[in-house]
Image (cartoon, rainbow, N blue to C red):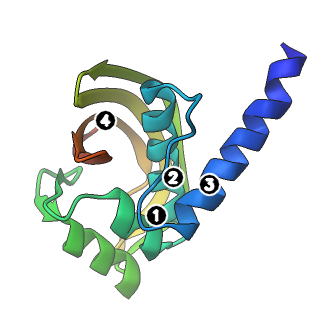
C-alpha cells in the first residue's frame, strides 16, 4: 500500500500542473475514467475556493446550467461573475463520499460538499448533496450539475 501512495501523489501533482498549463485537462494514461472525473471534481472545487478562473473556464462547459441551493438557475457566466465580483465568497469547500459511475460518454457523480461561504450579505455555508452529470464531448469531460441543500 505504501508503494502506491507516493506514485499516486506524484500523478496528482503532475495532473494538476498539466491542468493549469494547457487549454483542457489531460488524463494520465494509467488513470481510470472514474479517477479522472473525481480529479476534475476536486479541480473544480479548488478553482472556486482559489478563484482560479482559468481552470473554471476550462473545466465547466459554456452551456453549463446549475441550480442554487434556493432553487434558482444560474449559468457558467453568472457563477464566474459572482466569484469575480465578490458576491459569492467561499472560504472553505470540501467534497465527501464521492462516487463516480461511468456509462460510455456519460458519467454520474454523487457526493456531499461542506462549505463555508457567503452570497451577498447572507451566510450560504452548509452541507450540500450533489448529483453531477459529466458528458464527454470530443474527448473533453464537462459537468452539467444540480445542487441541493441538506
Q: Residue 16 carries which label?
A: 3
- Identity of the residue drawn at 89% across and 18% down: 2
- Tell me how far mark 2 sits from mark 4, CA to CA: 16 Å
The reply to whether discs 2 and 3 touch (Cβ–Cβ < 8 Å) is yes
N-term mark: 4 or 3: 3
CB within 8 Å, label 2 to label 4: no
Which of discs 2 and 3 lies nearer the camera? The answer is 3
* Circle nearer the N terminus (3, 1): 3
To which quarter of the image does residue 111 belong? top left
Image coordinates for residue 138, horizontal then vertical, percent: 23, 47
| SS state under label 1 | helix
Residue position for label 4: 130
Q: Which residue is drawn at 39% across and 83% down?
A: 84
Label number found at residue 15: none
The percent position of residue 51, horizontal first and vertical second, equals 50, 73
Classify residue 40 as left or right of residue 143: right
Q: Distance between the residues labelled 1 and 2?
A: 9 Å
Q: Look at the image and tell me in which quarter the N terminus lies.
A: top right
**SS at badge 4:** strand
Marks 4 and 3: which is nearer the front?
3
Residue ranking furthest to the bottom: 85
Under circle 2, the secondary element is helix
- Would you name the residue on which mark 1 appears? 48
Residue beneath disc 2: 43
Residue depth check, mark 3 versus mark 1: number of the one nearer the observer? 3
Q: Is residue 14 above or below residue 103?
A: below
Residue 7 falls left or right of residue 78: right
Would residue 71 be seen by someone viewing this image from the given angle? Answer: yes
Mark before the other along the chain sequence, 2 or 4: 2
Amino acid at each position: 500500500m505504501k508503494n502506491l501512495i507516493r506514485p499516486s501523489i506524484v500523478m496528482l501533482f503532475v495532473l494538476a500542473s498539466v491542468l493549469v498549463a494547457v487549454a483542457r485537462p489531460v488524463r494520465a494514461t494509467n488513470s481510470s475514467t472514474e479517477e479522472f472525473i473525481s480529479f476534475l471534481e476536486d479541480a473544480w472545487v479548488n478553482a472556486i475556493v482559489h478563484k482560479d478562473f482559468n481552470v473554471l473556464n476550462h473545466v465547466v462547459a459554456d452551456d453549463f446550467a446549475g441550480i442554487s441551493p434556493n432553487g434558482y438557475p444560474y449559468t457558467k457566466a453568472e457563477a464566474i461573475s459572482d466569484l469575480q465580483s465578490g458576491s459569492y465568497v467561499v472560504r472553505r469547500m470540501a467534497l465527501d463520499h464521492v462516487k463516480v459511475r461511468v456509462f460510455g460518454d456519460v458519467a454520474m457523480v454523487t457526493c456531499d460538499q461542506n462549505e463555508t461561504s457567503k452570497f451577498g450579505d447572507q451566510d450560504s455555508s452548509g452541507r450540500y448533496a450533489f448529483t453531477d452529470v459529466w458528458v464527454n464531448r470530443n474527448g473533453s469531460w464537462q459537468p452539467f450539475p444540480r445542487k441541493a441543500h441538506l
